[in-house]
Amino acid sequence: MARIIAVSNQKGGVGKTTSCINLAASLALLGRRTLLIDFDPQGNATSGLGFRPNECTQNIYPALIGKAPIAEQIVATQIKQLKLIPANVDLAGAEIELVGAMAREMKLKMIIEGLRPQFDYILIDCPPSLSLLTINSLSAADSVLVPLQCEYYAMEGLSQLLVTIDLIKNTLNPKLVIEGILPTMYDVRNNISKAVIEEVKVHFKDQIFRTVIPRNVRLSEAPSFGKPVFLYDRQSKGAISYLNLAKELLARNKKEAVQ
């Protein structure tokens, strides 16, 4: 049965979609049946895996509003064990259409629960905002992975997200936990990067991943070629870091299962 992980941060530009794509690809390369659900109307995870969002007839929108089965929206990617449910700008309309719907915050959960037996991991790329789509993602997830940019305002964005997570736990999804906090865009030459990680360790020492994602040119270039970084440059520091993240995630989940 799949573990559903929402990759979320209300602050944009923190490496959220890059982390979602490359973690999903890493898990697939390690032999895990993985599904990435693009739940952001911008469709960046879709284009980052080589698809043109506005040309995707299979996407999350019709399933979310009840016009098509979710299983029919799954497409294959360039990596054997990695599947994708695309998104495009149509998804923005779902927020308006769902406003008056019953159990509107639980729509995503209701349609993806049936997919659990088919996969080991389901990753949801959330919008970079507190919206009905984000609330749906957190309501559907078992856990939240938080990419945290190693920059000055990072802690401010993190504290806002934690308030949201607590709200979801108290009202919609009491089993929701933090999968981990992932430092991204780390620059070894920058004292601020080091200071941010030390600050996070003080407050969230058990939740921060040991793996740190560095600033890396290859990571930045890969999306423009519609590829995860492994298919673009598997020897790059970015590729190696995300593979290490996947291994750390698997080790954590195995330990929790034993306990």
Image: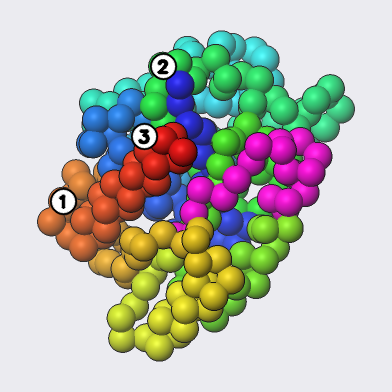
Where, by quadrant of the figure, is residue 63 drawn? top right
Is label 2 or label 1 in front?
2
Task: Residue at 31%, 68% (x, y): give it.
Answer: 214
Q: Amino acid at mark 3?
A: Phe
Q: Is residue 14 left or right of residue 203?
A: left
Vertical placement of residue 37 versus 177, above or below: above
Distance from label 2 to label 1 (Cα)? 27 Å
Magenta residues span: 164-182
Q: Is residue 63 left or right of residue 81?
A: right
> Does the magenta run of residues contain 5?
no
Q: Position of residue 156 (x, y in %)?
A: 65, 72
Q: Position of residue 37 (x, y in %)?
A: 49, 33
Vertical placement of residue 116 versus 245, above or below: above
Q: Position of residue 171 (x, y in %)?
A: 81, 39
Q: Which residue is mark 3?
A: 51
Task: Residue at 33%, 26% (x, y): give it.
Answer: 33
Q: Position of residue 196 (x, y in %)?
A: 49, 78
SS of the residue at dot 1?
Answer: loop
Distance from label 3 to label 2 (Cα)? 23 Å
Q: Which residue is mark 1?
A: 234
SS of the residue at dot 3?
Answer: loop
> Does the magenta run of residues contain 177?
yes
Q: Amino acid at mark 1?
A: Arg
Q: Tell how many labels.
A: 3
